[in-house]
Amino acid sequence: MSKNILILTGSPRQSGNSNIMAEFFMRAAESKGHTVKRIDCTRLHVGGCLACDTCYQNGKPCSVDEAFNSIADDILSADVLVFAMPVYWYTIPAQIKAVIDHLYCFCLREKEEYFGKQRALLACCEEHDPSVLDGVRIPFERMAALSKWEVIGEVLVPGVLHVGYITVTDGPARAAALADAL
Ligand SMILES: Cc1cc2nc3c(=O)[nH]c(=O)nc-3n(C[C@H](O)[C@H](O)[C@H](O)COP(=O)(O)O)c2cc1C
């Protein structure tokens, strides 16, 4: 069955390591007949959630953040959400974290379409210790549990610093192989 896949990327480096993995996954998924859309969170300029709890009160998911509202339908209509990002200071980079924080509106208003999706995670970091990736992996695992998302896979690659380093790891191939799990 053809699926509707949304990739949210969180690196400002257009040709960076996490975006390379996202590209490999995207191409593999498209070759299997899935529809894939990619949104670069670093270009969206979504601000932080204000915790005003006025979500949907004026008919829009977020009452204040039009940048988030511009992608809200893409998120809700996706069968599969794929998150791709580097580790920044042992956790999720700010621009994609701002988007993630706004998912709160779907939880608060119990939007049925938000729950029960599939999700995958592609992440990388400079340090060689794989536990550095816990700062991204663990929040996403908890988020998946709360959101009732089925985890279809995670590609977590330590030891990559500069643009392109990922190409000498198995990260891109593993990202592409995730398309088999759809
Ligand atoms: C602001 C910033 C913070 C970073 N923090 C970490 C870190 O805490 N641990 C780590 O191993 N690498 C850290 N890095 C390195 C990146 O995770 C690494 O270069 C990664 O390959 C970047 O992925 P990208 O090419 O997809 O942007 C940091 C890089 C930047 C720019």
Image (cartoon, rainbow, N blue to C red):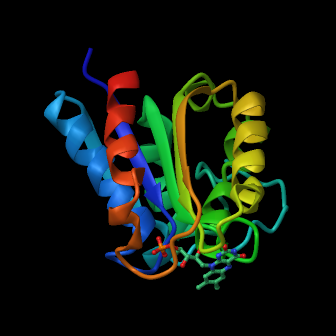
Q: Quadrant of the C terminus?
A: top left
Q: Position of residue 107 (x, y in %)?
A: 74, 38
Task: Report the front residue among 172 and 50.
Answer: 172
Residue at x 39%, y 34% (from the top left corner) = 178
Q: Is residue 182 visible?
A: no
Residue at x 67%, y 64% (from the top left corner) = 97
Q: Is residue 49 visible?
A: yes
Whether residue 23 sits left or right of residue 72 in the image: it is left
Task: Report the front residue among 27 and 165.
Answer: 165
Q: Position of residue 125 (x, y in %)?
A: 60, 68
Q: Whereabouts is ligand 1, in terms of quadrant?
A: bottom right
Residue at x 53%, y 63% (from the top left corner) = 85
Whether residue 9 sits left or right of residue 30 in the image: it is right
Q: Position of residue 133 (x, y in %)?
A: 69, 58
Residue 33's image quarter? top left
Residue at x 67%, y 40% (from the top left corner) = 106
Q: Position of residue 30 (x, y in %)?
A: 19, 38
Residue 148's image quarter? top right
Residue 51's image quarter? bottom right
**Residue 40 position (above or below residue 30):** below
**Residue 168 position (above or below residue 7):** below
Q: How many marks?
A: 0
Q: Quadrant of the N terminus?
A: top left
Task: Report the front residue among 170 and 148.
Answer: 170
